[in-house]
Image: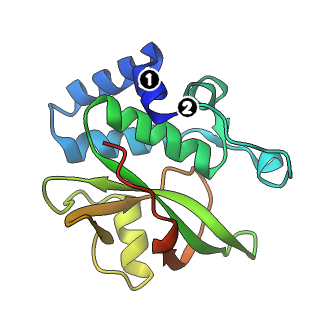
Amino acid sequence: LIEDGASQPPIYNLAMELWMLAGGDPELFTAYALEALHQMNYNFSKAYSEYGGVQPPLTTLIENSGVCMDYVLLYASILKAANVSTAIVFVKVWSSQYNIINQSHAMLAVKLPTQPKLPQEYHLYFIKQGYPSAASLTIEGEIYYLADPTPSVCIYIIAVSYTHLTLPTN
């Protein structure tokens, strides 16, 4: 789905526009893409449906709606179009907003050339949860930084599940 999404003209064109806007800076590019997804809508009815399923990244972009895995696939597709490596990570989270525990919330780990410096929400979010600045994972000897593209859901990470970590997408 990520390979296909990255090659879809609307996703590829969005990625190239964001890349040019960021002046080729990988961190700024990933921040712009993350912020764009944060403006979209979380599909609560799909989240609570037993028939929700995963939708293709282009569907998420067109419908402006999805759940965590849909946004992870779209974000990974946008980043892949600009050759930024990613890995899908599943975490156990608690939502203070809805007082529920989700056993498998999807997030994206992003490979950047240096530790992120931008004061983005997700960096502050991890610091508040007791993680080091710009929470990171080491995957196959490379450092990846956690990013949550899911819009408007207040969550607290309880545990990162390394056993469900996918291989890098690039």
- Name the residue nearer the viewer: 138 or 21: 138
Q: Amino acid at mark 1?
A: Ile
Q: Earlier in the sequence, mark 2 or mark 1?
A: 1
Vertical position of residue 160 compared to residue 84: above or below: below
Which color scheme did the rendering employ for the protein?
rainbow
Residue at image location 63% in from the left, 26% down from the top: 59
Determine the residue located farthest toward the top in the rendered image.
9
Residue 155, x across and y down, in percent: 59, 69
SS for callout 1? helix
| Direction from residue 147 to residue 69 in the image, left or right | right
| Direction from residue 75 to residue 26 in the image, left or right | left
Determine the residue located farthest toward the bottom in the rendered image.
130
Residue at image location 22% in from the left, 48% down from the top: 27
> Pointer 2 and pointer 1: residues touching (CB < 8 Å)?
yes
- Name the residue nearer the viewer: 119 or 122: 122
Q: CA distance from mark 2 to mark 1?
A: 8 Å
Q: What is the quadrant of the C terminus in the image?
A: top left
Residue 126, x across and y down, in percent: 40, 73
Residue 63, x across and y down, in percent: 67, 26
Vertical position of residue 73 compared to residue 61: above or below: below
The picture quadrant where one finds residue 14 is top left
Residue at image location 46% in from the left, 18% down from the top: 8
> According to the image, label 1 marks what residue?
11
Crowd tier of the residue under label 1, counting other residues whose Cα lies within 10 Å: few below 14, some 14–19, many 20 or above: many
Crowd tier of the residue under label 2, counting other residues whose Cα lies within 10 Å: few below 14, some 14–19, many 20 or above: many
Residue at image location 42% in from the left, 41% down from the top: 76
Vertical position of residue 148 compared to residue 158: above or below: above
> According to the image, label 2 marks what residue?
57
Q: Amino acid at mark 2?
A: Pro
Vertical position of residue 55 compared to residue 47: above or below: above
